[in-house]
Image: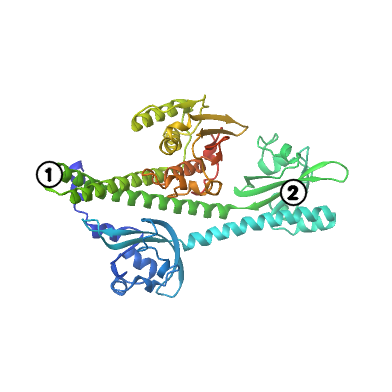
């Protein structure tokens, strides 16, 4: 099939076909909140067919929050409204949880003629999240309870371990097993007196990842390992256990998390679907807005003399707002692209990337900005992602910190596991109560509200990139005034082997 055939197929796709095949529920309301369109996915999720939904007020879904809490036509709530959660009552009478987006629909003159809402059912995802949190909390509680009881009575200690469904064993600092509980013996047999690395991991020598030295420094270590011939995955909590005669021992409690890991995989897939949805919507809306901006520019250029000042002002406003919307959509596309991160084949030269970002920002701002860059360590994070991180951190400083506040500073330091990069300014700073929320999507700080630039997505991109790389991002006050944005990234190239997190 050639490109002409592809374009012909795409040209014949109707809006009704597109809306009818997307997996998200979608409906349109007029200015009286009466439903005028109801797609098949909305019927599948809620149980209400199109003929029962169209023509009714959208409150028939009994949503919480609804009514005054809806927000669609509330002028005080910025649009679009992205990623809010609510509950509705289905036709069958059950309650489900939704994640939804809302926005105005406007005519060619920019007047509001209705609203659009898209949603997905996250009831199962929420239930799984609650279940995972409950399991994690239960594990911590049980481990703490067992450890406290061990100190009180050897008899009670043995009784507790024997009756646990989790596997448990005790090993000395010489790696010899001194105890295996019932669950452990059922899988491995009674192998007390033999080396733990041979019995559990089929290693003839001490395991390279053995946490024994950390445990004997009075630390509790948690890791995940496969045990036994069936290859099931266990979460293992290694705890120091001093003996009365001074012999150091380690208690290990192993919980089977094979099923939980599968659930986490399902959750990651749900998150990927959400990213794909955001990408699709952002891409489609950008394709709609770009011609609008072009038409406004064409009208002003070609027919400017025929229009009065009021018409020209309206055209200019529409063009400017369209450009801002396109910028927002571009940022949302960037955010959706920050998914699972694979280490670069070769270390990334962060100095080169930052210098490129500075050159681009200087060209954009129309003049050189004073930036003091220290020597930045290499990283295994891909170059494209390093660029996204620094173009947003430095871009914020360029846009919101006055030039007369002094030079911007870019540097780094390292510890045993991480490299910490920073971008420091001496501007107005970030209020203490905003230092967590400033990384949330669409959040714009108090000092940025009077600015014309910015979409509130840049720092969310940085945070998502850091989390995907097993890192962190935070902001501190610069001594003497200003803000210092810090980003920790792992030194090791093996960060992609760790469990992927959410968000």
371 on left or right of 156: left
55 on left or right of 243: left
Residue 77 placement: quadrant = bottom left
Q: In the image, residue 175 lies at what x, y percent?
A: 76, 39
Residue 33 placement: quadrant = bottom left
Residue at the outermost left position? 306
* Residue located at (56% from left, 55% from top): 259
Say whether residue 492 is visible. Answer: no
Q: Which label sits on residue 169? A: 2
Q: In the image, residue 103 lies at what x, y percent?
A: 34, 58
SS for dot 2: strand
Whichever of labels 1 and 2 marks the residue nearer the N terminus, that label is 2
Q: Nearer the viewer, residue 23 or 356?
A: 356
Q: Measured along the vertical axis of the image, is residue 467 above or below residue 111? A: above
Gap in angstroms between the C-alphas marked 1 and 2:
87 Å
Q: Nearer the viewer, residue 169 or 89?
A: 89
* Residue located at (35% from left, 65% from top): 42
Image marks 1 and 2: residues in contact by CB distance under 8 Å: no
Q: Measured along the vertical axis of the image, is residue 456 above or below residue 478? A: below
Say whether residue 112 is visible. Answer: yes
Residue at the outermost right position? 245
Q: In the image, residue 118 lies at what x, y percent?
A: 36, 60
* Residue carrying label 1: 305
SS for dot 1: helix
Q: Measured along the vertical axis of the image, is residue 492 above or below residue 461? A: above
């Amino acid at each position: 099939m050639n490109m002409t055939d592809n374009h012909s197929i795409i040209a014949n796709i109707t809006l009704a076909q597109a809306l009818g095949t997307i997996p998200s529920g979608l409906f349109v309301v007029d200015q009286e909140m009466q439903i005028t369109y109801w797609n098949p996915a909305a019927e599948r999720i809620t149980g209400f067919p199109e003929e029962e939904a169209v023509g009714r007020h959208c409150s028939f879904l009994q949503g919480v929050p609804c009514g005054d809490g809806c927000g669609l036509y509330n002028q005080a709530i910025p649009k679009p409204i992205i990623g809010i959660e609510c509950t509705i009552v289905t036709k069958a009478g059950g309650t489900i949880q939704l994640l939804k987006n809302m926005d105005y629909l406007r005519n060619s003159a920019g007047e509001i003629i209705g609203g659009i809402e898209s949603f997905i059912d996250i009831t199962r995802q929420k239930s799984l999240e609650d279940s995972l949190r409950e399991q994690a909390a239960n594990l911590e509680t049980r481990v703490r309870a067992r450890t406290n009881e061990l100190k009180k009575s050897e008899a009670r200690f043995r009784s507790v371990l024997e009756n646990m469904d989790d596997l448990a064993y005790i090993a000395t600092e010489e790696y010899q097993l001194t105890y295996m509980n019932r669950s452990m013996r059922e899988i491995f047999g009674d192998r007390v007196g033999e080396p733990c690395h041979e019995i559990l991991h089929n290693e003839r020598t001490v395991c390279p990842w053995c946490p024994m030295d950390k445990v004997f420094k009075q630390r509790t270590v948690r890791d995940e390992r496969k045990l036994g011939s069936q290859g099931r995955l266990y979460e293992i909590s290694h705890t120091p256990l001093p003996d009365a005669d001074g012999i150091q021992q380690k208690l290990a409690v192993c919980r089977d998390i094979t099923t939980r890991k599968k659930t986490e995989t399902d959750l990651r897939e749900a998150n990927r679907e959400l990213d794909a949805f955001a990408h699709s919507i952002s891409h489609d809306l950008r394709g709609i807005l770009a011609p609008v901006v072009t038409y406004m520019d064409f009208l002003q250029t070609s027919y400017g003399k025929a229009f009065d000042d009021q018409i020209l002002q309206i055209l200019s406003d529409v063009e400017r707002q369209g450009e801002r919307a396109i910028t927002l959509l571009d940022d949302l596309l960037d955010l959706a692209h920050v998914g699972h991160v694979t280490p670069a084949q070769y270390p990334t030269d962060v100095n080169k990337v930052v210098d490129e970002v500075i050159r681009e920002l200087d060209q954009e701002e129309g003049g050189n900005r004073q930036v003091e860059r220290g020597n930045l360590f290499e990283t295994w994070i891909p170059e494209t992602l390093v660029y996204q991180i620094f173009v947003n951190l430095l871009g914020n400083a360029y846009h919101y910190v006055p030039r007369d506040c002094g030079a911007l500073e870019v540097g780094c330091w390292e510890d045993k596991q991480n490299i910490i990069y920073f971008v420091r300014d001496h501007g107005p700073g970030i209020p203490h109560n905003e230092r967590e929320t400033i990384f949330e999507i669409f959040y714009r700080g108090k000092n940025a509200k009077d600015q014309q630039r910015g979409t509130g997505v840049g720092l969310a991109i940085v945070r998502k990139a850091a989390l995907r790389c097993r890192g962190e991002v935070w902001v501190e006050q610069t001594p003497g005034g200003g803000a210092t944005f810090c980003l920790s990234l792992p030194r090791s190239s093996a960060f992609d082997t760790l469990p992927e997190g959410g968000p």
